[in-house]
Image: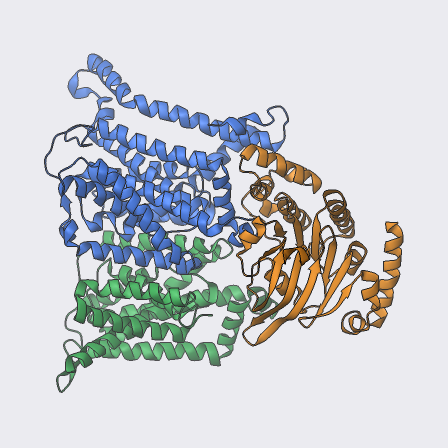
């Protein structure tokens, strides 16, 4: 029973981290129907930033995430203005393919600059700290990241539902032309949404070097899983994505423990295929 | 090959004759290119001999043409344009952007590989079995996936690659993650294996590419080709005109998967080794898509032009800079530019040049 | 049994989307060689009914017979192959194919051979006055030509029953006259049966042998246009008194022109 609980806790912690990574993606998908394939590479770039800040500047990730978030925001802004905005009036695949190109540039750019080495950050404030309850172990870095995930998803939810800006974003996502007529500067709104999405993944990248090695490929798998989560959650549904992330974290954890570690991603990807067979627009989609 | 496009209205200056004119020019260039590639290895022998006669051995430049590195680059160009052309059928003409083609490629590779390594036979039974298996699996995967729209479909194809990759990694029958290593066996066309010479591989790859280009050229001018594009442009409308869009998509997918598997078989016979990450990975899948996009998606020449630019870039930056990922940075940049500025890819640039020339 | 059926027979069709009932117990029939107008105010359920006939929706209840066969619930392409072909209210050409290629896709329904299909397509382009633009990408056409293309593409399939979903709406008055002429010609000369959903009364009434009026998802009247015009329910629900008088005048003029 205790192992089961432990595996469940690990799954939930993992799922929360996925939720954090996926939240920004869910935003862009919902508002402009764009999958940013470079999402994982944004994450990787933010992780490198945190790593170097800690390595050369001694800044702890618990502080550096602010910088990483800002960095993600600016990266998102830049990428939207330079690339994505030009794809919006083309086929739905245009943005996907263009951001593919971008992800190759970012990934291989980091490979070129920083070599393929795995870089592990040591000496962070939370390193090795954990909460022990009976035989259950909750590692603190992961827990803190999970709390961030919860805060982030709630903040985004409130932003969308309770603020004027959120109202403008929703109007833009429903009907761009009508929003224009209501006096909303949709280009600005879309830029902001993309930048916010970058900021979310930036914060995630700011925190994750606490317990994950940094390397040029680190974003790829996270991208894939984030896509699964957003698709499974349902077209742009923030809440759906959150639950999908938890589900995927749990399935990964159970399959890894009770079946075999190599099979955990088989289980996760199969789960997606099964879910969309049953609900082609995702769990919370319509 | 160009009978019906050439036949209609040579006299009237209406745009039709110009479009069929473009087609015949394209056929003409294609056949010319094929003939040139057929004699290229012989030509370089000739040039080499002449040059050797004038500038004896250490100075010979043309001999480089026959150098195995040069042939290697050509073989890869042929192979990758064949692969991308196979993908182009379903991805370009039919508009179903699949990121799952490395699965079919891998199945073809393992088909030939198993035949040689595990069963000690010639590769051909495995080639055939691989192609059939790939088509069958393509049908089984695609049928449920075609119900999904847009990004949901794309993500499903990613998922399929990841699942197959990891299943193959732990599948004992095919040696799992260890992969298959070819033993030293007799050379020759029967085995389709050569250890020192690359000329035979060159012709093999050329034949493979030609076959696939002929298939696509044939489709372009027949009903099925029109249906493919109609389904891409609007499945619902096509259905209202009596087109069974699901069947069209499934047939295109099966055809595409089958010939992709042939390319996979060639790949393993050329490398003499296969393991799951080599053939069944997202990166491999992306090659299919991005080469076609770079060259010109949904066009006959796109896959060739894409491979013609990408492969030398890849091979030579690696040779000259030993550059970690430099080629891919450039490739990524080109993809971004193509998507933003020239959706028809290199093919679009080339045909624009043609058009302006004609106007002058 | 099939002998008693009309060419197209809609029997008690009900279509529900969740709790919303778009059509309720609608029945009517279309005789071979006639032109039938399906009219009604916005939201009356015309297009929904149309989509049920063409197989885009599966009716929640009721049956639809075409040419003696039960077609209810069959997929659209099967219905199209049996000879009942439709246009769409919102024109959707195959944008990146040329106009000629667009029409050839339609022609392939009755002809596999590319050369012959092209011949058929060219004839249909002539009929719809599209010959000059036949090598343009269909996406580049202005709206009027797109509507013509929609019609040409459907004609190329050689339909037995032609179903037009607001094919005339949005055209200029010259274009409307042209289209009306074409529809009449198709009906008289080729013996094509035509079912048209339409807003523009000026066009529908003089053309139709019979009109079916829907309101709120229910059939409120059916009959020859000059009768339906006087129907109390129709006047109330749809035209309003003033407008109906104006229509009657138009109608009278239209019939005169016809003779």
**In-front residue for pair C186/C250:** C186
The residue at the far left in this view is B184
Asked if B1 appears above or below B284 in the picture, the reply is above
| Horizontal relation, residue C184 to residue C152: left or right | right
Q: Residue B299, how many percent across, how many down?
A: 45, 39
Depth check, front residue: C43 or A33: C43
Residue A234, above or below B354:
below
Whether residue C27 can be seen here: yes
Taking the spot 70% from the left edge, 43% from the top edge, the residue there is C128
Residue C146, given in percent of the width and then of the height, sits at 64, 49
Location of the C terminus of chain B by quadrant is: top right
Q: Quadrant of residue C116?
A: top right
Image quadrant in which you'd find residue B160: bottom left
Q: Quadrant of residue C245?
A: bottom right
State which chain is coloured blue: B
- In the picture, measured across the screen, residue C209 lies left or right of residue A206, that is right
Query: How many numbered circles does the render carry?
Result: 0
Pinpoint residue A282: horizontal percent, then vertical percent: 40, 68
Q: Which chain is orange?
A: C
Hey, which residue is sitting farthest top in the picture?
A: B53
In the rendered image, residue A168, in percent from the top left (x then y), is placed at: 52, 73
Query: How is the model colour-coded?
Result: by chain
Q: Residue drawn at (85%, 59%), measured in percent from left and top?
A: C251
Q: Residue furthest front?
A: C1
B127 vs A130, nearest the viewer: B127
Q: Say which chain is green.
A: A
């Amino acid at each position: 029973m205790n192992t089961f609980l432990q595996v469940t806790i690990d799954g939930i912690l993992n799922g929360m981290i996925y939720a954090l990574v996926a939240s920004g993606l869910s935003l862009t998908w919902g508002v402009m129907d764009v999958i940013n394939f470079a999402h994982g590479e944004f994450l990787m770039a933010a992780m490198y930033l945190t790593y170097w800040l800690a390595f050369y500047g001694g800044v702890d990730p618990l502080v550096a995430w602010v910088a990483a978030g800002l960095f993600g925001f600016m990266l998102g802004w830049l990428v939207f203005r330079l690339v994505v905005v030009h794809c919006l009036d083309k086929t739905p695949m245009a943005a996907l393919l263009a951001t593919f190109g971008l992800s190759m540039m970012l990934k291989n750019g980091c490979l070129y600059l920083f070599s393929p080495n795995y870089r592990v950050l040591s000496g962070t404030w939370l390193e090795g700290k954990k909460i022990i309850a009976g035989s259950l172990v909750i590692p603190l870095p992961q827990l803190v990241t999970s709390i961030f995930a919860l805060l982030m998803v709630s903040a985004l939810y409130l932003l969308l539902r309770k603020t004027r800006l959120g109202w403008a974003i929703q109007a833009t996502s429903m009907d761009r032309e009508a929003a224009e007529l209501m006096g909303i500067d949709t280009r600005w709104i879309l830029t902001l949404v993309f930048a916010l999405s970058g900021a979310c993944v930036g914060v995630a990248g700011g925190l994750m070097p606490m317990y994950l090695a940094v390397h040029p490929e680190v974003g790829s798998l996270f991208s894939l899983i984030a896509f699964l989560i957003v698709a499974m959650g349902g077209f742009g549904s923030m809440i759906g994505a959150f639950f999908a992330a938890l589900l995927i974290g749990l399935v990964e954890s159970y399959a890894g423990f009770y079946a075999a570690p190599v099979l955990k991603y088989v289980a996760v990807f199969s789960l997606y295929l099964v879910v969309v067979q049953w609900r082609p627009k995702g769990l919370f989609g319509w | 090959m160009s009978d019906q496009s050439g036949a209609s209205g040579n006299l009237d200056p209406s745009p039709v004759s110009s479009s069929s004119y473009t087609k015949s020019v394209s056929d003409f260039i294609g056949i010319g290119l094929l003939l040139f590639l057929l004699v290229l290895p012989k030509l370089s022998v000739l040039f080499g001999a002449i040059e050797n006669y004038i500038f004896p051995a250490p100075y010979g430049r043309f001999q480089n043409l026959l150098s195995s590195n040069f042939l290697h680059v050509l073989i890869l160009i042929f192979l990758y344009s064949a692969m991308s052309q196979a993908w182009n059928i379903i991805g370009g003409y039919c508009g179903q952007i699949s990121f799952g083609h490395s699965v079919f490629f891998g199945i073809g590779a393992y088909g030939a590989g198993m035949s040689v390594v595990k069963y000690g036979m010639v590769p051909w039974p495995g080639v055939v079995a691989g192609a059939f298996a790939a088509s069958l699996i393509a049908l089984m995967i695609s049928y449920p996936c075609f119900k999904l729209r847009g990004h949901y479909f794309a993500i499903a194809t990613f998922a399929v690659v990841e699942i197959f990759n990891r299943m193959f990694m732990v599948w004992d029958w095919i040696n799992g993650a260890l992969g298959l290593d070819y033993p030293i066996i007799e050379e020759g066309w029967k085995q389709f294996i050569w250890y020192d010479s690359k000329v035979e591989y060159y012709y093999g790859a050329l034949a493979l590419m030609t076959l696939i280009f002929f298939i696509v050229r044939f489709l372009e001018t027949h009903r099925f080709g029109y249906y493919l594009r109609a389904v891409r442009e609007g499945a619902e409308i096509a259905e209202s005109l009596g087109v069974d869009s699901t069947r069209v998509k499934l047939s295109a997918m099966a055809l595409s998967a089958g010939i992709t598997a042939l390319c996979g078989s060639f790949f393993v016979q050329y490398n003499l080794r296969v393991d799951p990450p080599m053939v069944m990975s997202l990166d491999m899948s992306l090659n299919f898509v991005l080469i076609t996009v770079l060259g010109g998606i949904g066009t006959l020449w796109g896959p060739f032009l894409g491979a013609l630019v990408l492969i030398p870039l890849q091979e030579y930056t690696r040779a000259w800079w030993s550059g970690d990922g430099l080629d891919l940075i450039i490739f990524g940049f080109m993809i971004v530019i193509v998507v933003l500025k020239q959706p028809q890819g290199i093919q679009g640039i080339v045909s624009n040049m043609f058009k302006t020339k004609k106007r002058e | 049994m099939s002998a008693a059926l009309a060419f197209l027979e809609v029997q008690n069709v009900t279509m529900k989307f969740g709790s919303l009932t778009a059509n309720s117990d609608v029945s009517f029939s279309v005789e071979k060689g006639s032109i039938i107008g399906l009219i009604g105010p916005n939201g009356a359920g015309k297009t929904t009914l149309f989509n049920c006939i063409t197989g885009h929706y599966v009716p929640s209840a009721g049956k639809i017979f075409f040419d003696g066969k039960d077609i209810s619930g069959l997929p659209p392409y099967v219905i199209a192959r049996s000879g009942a072909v439709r246009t769409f209210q919102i024109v959707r050409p195959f944008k990146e194919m040329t106009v000629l290629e667009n029409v050839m896709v339609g022609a392939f329904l009755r002809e596999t051979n590319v050369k012959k299909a092209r011949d058929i397509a060219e004839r249909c382009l002539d009929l719809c006055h599209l010959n000059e633009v036949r090598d343009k990408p269909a996406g580049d056409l202005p709206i009027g030509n797109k509507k013509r293309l929609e019609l040409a593409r459907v004609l190329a399939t050689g339909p037995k029953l032609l179903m037009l979903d607001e094919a005339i709406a949005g055209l200029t008055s010259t274009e409307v006259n042209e289209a009306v002429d074409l529809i009449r010609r198709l009906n008289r000369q080729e013996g094509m049966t035509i079912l048209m959903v339409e807003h523009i009364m000026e066009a529908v009434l003089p053309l139709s042998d019979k009109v079916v009026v829907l309101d709120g998802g229910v059939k409120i009247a059916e009959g020859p246009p000059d009768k339906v015009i006087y129907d109390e329910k129709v006047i109330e629900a749809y035209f309003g008194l003033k407008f109906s008088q104006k229509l009657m005048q138009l109608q009278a003029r239209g019939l005169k022109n016809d003779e």
